[in-house]
Image (cartoon, rainbow, N blue to C red):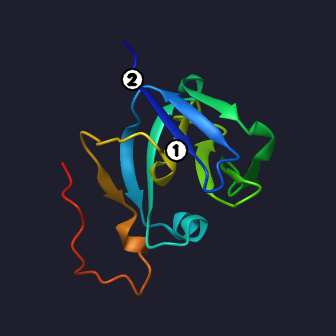
């Protein structure tokens, strides 16, 4: 039996489901993720593109090409960050889900912190990060 995870944006105009748990969970400190989330880091988990289904509000999903190979998707009504993906290269057949938009409880088996060297200068380097396995 496939585990199904549901999620939505802040205003619930966009509702989606994942056919299986997110993989490759990471907390990214790069400047693009920080700006997209408006926070010290962004938390994402990835699924094969075919495992993401927009159940409602696909017309509200907007896309922004944040680089030559990556795009970020968000709700055009409330602005919630939803997804990011690569248009070419390795993992172009996967999409990353902003984990804060999940409505179904999810606990990753493993997670990692990436691009810590790009952390915001106001983010304390001595700040404790969640355990990484």
126 vs 22, left or right, is left
Q: What is the crowding at mark 1: few (fewer than 14 residues within 10 Å), some, or many (at least 20)?
A: many
Query: Are the residues flagged by discs 1 and 2 in contact, CB closer than 8 Å?
Result: no
Judged from this view, the residue extending furthest toward the front is 12
Q: Against 44, is 92 above or below? A: above
Identify whether 124 is placed above or below 84. Answer: below
Q: Is residue 15 left or right of residue 116?
A: right
Viewer-closest of 37 and 28: 37
**First in residue order: circle 1 vs circle 2:** 2
| Displayed quadrant of residue 78 | bottom right
Residue 52 pos. (x, y %)? 57, 30
Q: Where residue 114 sits: x, y (%)?
A: 37, 59
Residue occupying the point 49% across, 72% down: 39
Q: Quadrant of residue 24?
A: top left
Q: Residue at x 47, y 54 (%)?
A: 100
**What residue is shown with label 2?**
3
Question: Element at badge 2?
Answer: loop
> Image quadrant of residue 16?
top right
For marks 1 and 2, give the one nearer the viewer: 2
Q: Position of residue 73 (x, y in %)?
A: 68, 49
At mark 1, the secondary structure is strand
Q: Report the disc number at residue 28.
A: none
Q: Residue at x 81, y 41 (%)?
A: 59
- Tell me what residue is drawn at x 37 percent, y 51 percent: 26
Quarter in which the N terminus is drawn: top left
- Residue placed most toward the observer, 35 or 116: 35
Q: CA distance from mark 1 to mark 2?
A: 16 Å
Tell me if 123 is positioned left or right of 90 in this view.
left
The residue most toward the top is 1
Q: Which mark is residue 97?
A: 1
The residue carrying pointer 2 sits among few (fewer than 14), some (14 to 19) or many (20 or more) residues within 10 Å by Cα, namely few
């Amino acid at each position: 039996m496939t585990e199904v995870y549901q999620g939505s944006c802040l205003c619930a105009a966009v509702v989606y489901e994942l056919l299986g748990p997110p993989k490759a969970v990471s907390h990214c400190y790069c400047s693009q993720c920080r700006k997209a989330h408006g926070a010290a880091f962004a938390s994402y988990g990835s699924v094969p593109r075919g495992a993401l289904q927009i159940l409602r509000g696909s017309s509200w999903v907007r896309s922004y090409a944040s680089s030559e190979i990556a795009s970020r998707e968000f709700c055009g009504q409330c602005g919630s960050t939803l997804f990011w993906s690569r248009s070419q290269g390795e993992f172009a057949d996967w999409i990353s889900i902003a984990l804060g938009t999940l409505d179904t409880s999810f606990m990753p088996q493993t997670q990692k912190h990436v691009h810590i060297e790009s952390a915001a200068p106001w983010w304390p380097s001595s700040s404790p990060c969640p355990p990484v396995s």
